[in-house]
Image (spheres, helix red, strand yellow):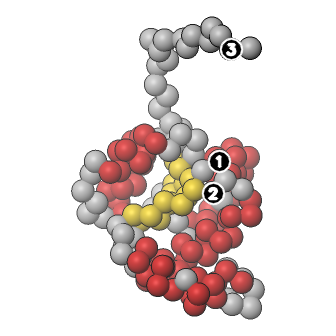
Amino acid sequence: MCSEEKNVFYSYFRRERAAYVRRMSRYDIVGISITSKAQLIPALTLCYRLRQLNRKQVLFLGGNYISRLVSCHEKKLGFIFRYVDFLSCFEGEPLIEAITRIKIKSREVVLDVARHVGGVLVKERGGKVIYMPARLRCAHNVACPNFDGFP
């Protein structure tokens, strides 16, 4: 992941996109949405470079591919926490909304919010990888849409 000989994206983020990566490293938290398998290595490489520039930055991955990956391979994903702090699964909007409402003082504060909201895969201090399912909202009172006029 972290050598130019084995990973073409490493030199891309280190040289061609260095200014962009430096700007991204100034943020307290960065989330990357991954929708296909082909985006995983570039995203992890970007996270690796960001972590080199700012060790305090909170990094997470989400998106359709991450949700499918966690569904099928939850127990095998411990390695990924070398690059990111947590994985956001399925509906990420409640998590992002909760994170934007807090003052980010440390990585632990963000992880506590993520655990509370749910829908995340995190690595605990002891090294155990845990999936915290999302707390689903009750849909009983949601009005059914009117599909009159549709073919």
Residue 98 rendering spot, x and y as whole percentages: 35, 45
Name which quarter of the figure residue 107 lies in.
bottom left
> In percent of the image, x 57 and y 10: which residue is there?
146
Decide: few, some or many residues near mark 3? Use Cα within 10 Å; few <14, some 14-19, many ≥20: few
Label whose residue precedes the other's in the sequence (1 or 2): 2
Whether the residues at callouts 1 and 2 have beta carbons within 8 Å, the answer is yes
Horizontal relation, residue 9 to residue 25: left or right: right
Of 65 and 147, the residue lying toward us: 147
Q: Amino acid at mark 3?
A: Phe
* Element under disc 2: loop
Please say if 50 is above or below 84: below
Please say if 53 is above or below 129: below
> In percent of the image, x 44 and y 64: which residue is there?
30
Write down the residue under mark 3. Answer: 150
Residue 14 rendering spot, x and y as whole percentages: 56, 88
* Element under disc 1: helix
Whether the residues at callouts 2 and 3 have beta carbons within 8 Å, the answer is no
Residue 55 showing in the rendered view = no
Write down the residue under mark 1. Answer: 64
* Element under disc 3: loop
Write down the residue under mark 2. Answer: 34
Label whose residue precedes the other's in the sequence (2 or 3): 2
Decide: few, some or many residues near mark 1? Use Cα within 10 Å; few <14, some 14-19, many ≥20: some
Decide: few, some or many residues near mark 2? Use Cα within 10 Å; few <14, some 14-19, many ≥20: some
Residue 90 rendering spot, x and y as whole percentages: 58, 41
> In percent of the image, x 57 and y 74: which residue is there?
46
Residue 124 showing in the rendered view = yes
Q: Amino acid at mark 1?
A: Asn
Q: Nearer the viewer, mark 2 or mark 3?
A: 3
